[in-house]
Amino acid sequence: MVLKNLILSGFVSVVCIGLLQAAEGGDGARPSPTDLATKAWVALKAEDHELVSKLTTQCFEEFGDEAVRQQKESGEEISKENASSFPELNSVGTCLFILAESLSQQGNKEKSQATLKKLITDFPECYCENKQGYYWKPALAAEKRLAGATEKSD
C-alpha cells in the first residue's frame, strides 16, 4: 500500500511539474527529461503500455548518457536538498521505475525485475518528487519491490 501511495504521489507531482512546464511554452523544442517522465507516469496510469515503452526509451536515448555522468561524476553527494540539480538522472531513474511497473502490469515479471535491478545498480541516487514536495528514491522502492517478489516466491 505504501509503495502504491509513493507511486501515485510521484505521478501527481511529476504531472504537476509537466503541466507547469507545458504552460511555459510549447515551441516544439526537444522535450525535457522531466517532460518525458511526466508523460510516462500519465501513460502508466492510463495503462498505455506501448506509450510507456516509447517515452521511457526516448528518455534513455536522449538523456541516458548525461544521467550516467551525473550518477558517477557529480562531484557532490546527491541529497533531497540538491536533487533538483540532476534532472536527467532523476528522470532516467524514474523512467526505469515506471517501465518496471508497466512490465509488471503486463505480466512480464522477469523483465520488470531486471529493470528494477538496473535501476538499483545504475541509478541508485536518483530522486523523484511527489506533489507534497517530498523526494523519494526509486531505487529504494525497487529494492522493496524485489524483496517482496522474493518473499512471494519462497
Image (cartoon, helix red, strand yellow):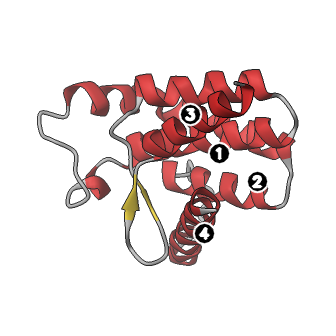
Q: Which residue position holds label 1? A: 98
Q: CA distance from mark 2 to mark 3?
A: 23 Å
What label sits on residue 18 in the rendered view? none
Q: Which residue position holds label 2? A: 44
Q: CA distance from mark 2 to mark 1?
A: 7 Å
SS at circle 1: helix
The count of marks equals 4
Give the side of residue 101 with respect to residue 61, left or right: right
Q: Are marks 2 and 1 in contact (CB under 8 Å)?
A: yes
Q: Which residue position holds label 4? A: 15
Q: Amino acid at mark 2?
A: Leu
When the figure is inspected, residue 60 is found, relative to residue 16, above or below; the finding is above
- Sooner in the amino-acid sequence: mark 2 or mark 3: 2
Q: Amino acid at mark 1?
A: Ile
- Sooner in the amino-acid sequence: mark 4 or mark 3: 4
Q: Are marks 3 and 1 in contact (CB under 8 Å)?
A: no
Give the side of residue 48 with respect to residue 153, left or right: right
Q: CA distance from mark 3 to mark 1?
A: 18 Å
Q: Which residue position holds label 3? A: 147
Q: Are marks 2 and 4 in contact (CB under 8 Å)?
A: no
- Sooner in the amino-acid sequence: mark 3 or mark 1: 1
Q: Nearer the viewer, mark 4 or mark 3?
A: 3
- Sooner in the amino-acid sequence: mark 1 or mark 4: 4
Q: Amino acid at mark 4?
A: Val
Q: CA distance from mark 4 to mark 3?
A: 28 Å
What residue do we see at 39% from left, 40% from top?
A: 89
Q: Are marks 4 and 3 in contact (CB under 8 Å)?
A: no
What residue do we see at 43% from left, 78% from top?
A: 132
